[in-house]
Amino acid sequence: MAITKTDFMRGMQCRKMLWLDKHKPGLRVIPPEVQARLDAGNDFGDLAMGMFGPYEEMTVYLPGKRIPNKKAMIEKTQDALARGVPVICEAAFSNYNNYCAVDILRRTETGYDLYEVKNAPEVQEQFIRDAGFQYYIVSRCGLKIGHICIVIHGPDEENPFVPVDVTRQAKGYYRYINDNIWDLNRMQKEPEEVETAPGEHCTSPYECWYYEYCHGQRNEKSSMSLEDI
Ligand code: SF4
């Protein structure tokens, strides 16, 4: 695979972050509170799959591992689309090996609406950029996308899934994605470590897991999958 959604989001926060992901992932240090937040987000995402009723999930793991089998997921998604499945979760797409998995696709009269689930009380700009990346890949694969929504965590715990329509903003990221995805793809393969000076990007929009490495402190190993972001 070339650039995934996670790669793009991390590479646009800091190119060195993406380079380290590919060449020195053992340097990551993930604070326990961040891990807990990621786990809660995964649980919220799992529950959201049923927000429109019955669905088919495309997740396939490599034998004996909790690592997604992307090739199998892409094939399974194409089969679900061909059958006109009304709600498809973790729908996987690849364009020139760039890859994304969409939390929820919901069939419409003209194509599908796209839903990105975030366990957060309000929409943040990086969520829209994330959805924009998915739109870029999915639309280049030939699927017609109508509305794009971020599903946030509303105050009603009985029904916490609140879709917020961000169609115009997310589709507006198309050129931005195209202008950067190929450069990130080339950069991540560079043999020499990319040099980026620490700055505000080390904590915004997300605290970097290489913070201790770049700021000259000791680090430990982490086994977390980057696909869990
Ligand atoms: S700590 Fe800062 S400079 Fe180092 S990889 Fe992370 S974001 Fe980039």
Image (cartoon, rainbow, N blue to C red):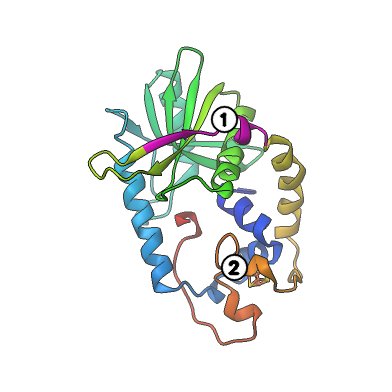
Nearest to the observer: residue 31 or residue 128: 128
Q: Position of residue 77 (x, y in %)?
A: 45, 31
Label 2: which residue? Answer: 203
Q: Is disc 1 surrounded by few (<14), some (14 to 19) or many (20+) residues within 10 Å?
A: many
Vertical placement of 81 versus 76: above or below? above
| 37 lies left or right of 4 | left
Q: Position of residue 62 (x, y in %)?
A: 40, 50
Is 167 magenta? The answer is yes
Instruction: Specify the quadrant of the image occupied by residue 177.
Output: top right
Instruction: Specify the quadrant of the image occupied by residue 14.
Output: bottom right
Vertical placement of 221 versus 121: above or below? below
Nearest to the observer: residue 87 or residue 146: 146
In the image, what residue type sits under mark 2?
A: Thr
Label 1: which residue? Answer: 167
Q: Position of residue 41 (x, y in %)?
A: 38, 53
Ligand 1 is located in which of the four quadrants?
Answer: bottom right
Is 36 magenta? The answer is no
Point out the stretch of residues depicted in magenta. Answer: 162-172
Confirm if mark 2 falls within 8 A of ligand 1.
no
Task: Say which label, 1 or 2, has the lower sequence index.
Answer: 1
Badge 2 element: loop
Numbered mark located on residue 6 in the image: none
Q: Is disc 2 surrounded by few (<14), some (14 to 19) or many (20+) residues within 10 Å?
A: few
Vertical placement of 126 versus 166: above or below? below
| Measured Cα–Cα span from mark 1 to mark 2 | 28 Å
| 80 lies left or right of 220 | left
In the image, what residue type sits under mark 1?
A: Thr
The single residue placed furthest to the left in the displayed view is 158
Task: Give the residue at x 59% y 68%.
Answer: 203
